[in-house]
Amino acid sequence: MNDRLERTQIYDWHKEHGDVIPFAGWEMPVRYSSIKEEHMAVRDSCGIFDVSHMLRMRIEGPDSIDFLQTVTTNNVSKLKINGGQYSTCLNENGGTFDDLMLYRIGEEAFIWVTNAANGAKIWAHIQEQAKKFDVNVTDKTKEIAMIAVQGPNALALLSKMSEKDMGEFGRFTCNPITIAGYDTFLCRTGYTGEAGAEVLVLNCSFSDEGKTRAIGFWKELLNQGAEFGIKPCGLGARDSTRLEAGFVLYGHELDEETSPIEARIPYAVKFKVEPHYIGYDVVRSHKKEGVKKTRIGFVMIDRGIPREKYPILFNGVKIGMTTSGGLSPISNKGIGMGYVHPDTVNDGDIIEIDIKGRHRRAEITKWPFYDSEKYGETRTI
């Protein structure tokens, strides 16, 4: 058995400047300064994350659309070239193998980006399913670096570096452009709730030359982003920003026992014409007939920081368990998500979180857990 941890192309820089920890089989930076400082850089200015540990597959061939229609839940046939969509990949019982981003880069060519923790599982699943179709699936993870540039100043920075107006590129698009002399795919997506992009930097193999190239792009972002208040960000801020935005995380809000309908991410699911995807009938029944659990969000009223797997109580009765929790740097209050039995609570209801034997009050609240007029991609102030 090989227990050696993988490293991204930018690892040497992370090791020199940040705190590196094991994560999903990789050595990844958890922070460089403090999680709060990095979190607020993303909310107020700009932060960059190395997300090169995520699995990136290229899928191409005459049957690529039909193949992807059977293994993902969104409607691939509606995806235009240079478009992207958020989707899920399910098992036969409607449980979630993973959530993913799918980008169409050609008539019969796609890039699939999936979570690092599920890389081996998804790779094996896709390889097996692909045998039924005329498609070719290749792992591009170690040929492409992937850097998320997020925050209200992110697009201004990328406009400066590419000499292109980022206003040309709408959300959920994926376009080949040159940024500071580097060939990239600019994917107008992210995992923080803020404006920005996830940049696929091409020709970044794990050779010395490829690593130098990836680190060079990372440094270029930091150098040119200085005027925009840029900061390098680690896994800690990546998790706190996604939690504050109310986004699901695999292994917490999503797993093989949970459908996308239960997770309340219906935008990832389309009930399309055949070929139907794996798990279609179960998910359709969840949509039409209801579910046995549903995701909620809450903000703490009493002092206390919720974490995963804490009991959720209503009127003294346990109704579910938390899946994620932490401290919101914006509000300085505990926030979290979890699953409860449907029709037990509504927005505004007061529940209790059992935090290590102490019951602490919280209010059921819609996500995101911040004022969307002041923060996030739709901010108006």
Image (tube, grey):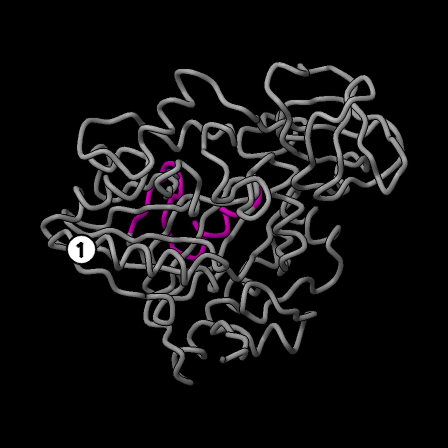
Residue depicted at 86% across the width and 42% down the height:
356
Q: Percent from the top left, x then y, of residue 262?
A: 50, 29
Residue 298, picture quadrant:
top right
- Give the tally of numbered discs: 1
174 left or right of 11?
A: left
Residue pointed to by mark 1: 60
Q: Residue furthest bottom?
A: 208
**Picture quadrant where residue 336 is located:** top right
Q: Is residue 165 above or below residue 198?
A: above
* Amino acid of disc 1: Glu
Task: Give how far across and how far down residue 86 sits, in percent.
Answer: 39, 39
- Secondary structure of the residue carrying numbered label 1: strand
Residue at 35% from the left image edge and 39% from the top image edge: 85
The x and y percentages for residue 57 are 31, 59
Is residue 118 magenta-colored? Answer: no
Quarter of the image containing the C terminus? top right
User: In this rendering, would 314 be left or right of 253?
Assistant: right
Identify the residue shown where x is 19% and y is 46%. Answer: 67
Question: In the rendered image, which quarter is residue 143 located in?
Answer: bottom left
10 shown above or below 378 = below
Dot 1: few (<14), some (14–19), or many (≥20) neighbours within 10 Å? many
Q: Which residues are magenta?
A: 151-175
- Left-right relation of 309 to 164: right
Between 216 and 371, the one nearer to me in the picture: 371
Q: Position of residue 111 (x, y in %)?
A: 29, 53
Front one among 29 and 1: 1
Question: As drawn, is 352 to the left or to the right of 366?
Answer: right
Q: What residue sits 50% from the left and 40% below the top?
A: 257
Residue 163 drawn in magenta: yes
- Toward the viewer: 322 or 147? 322
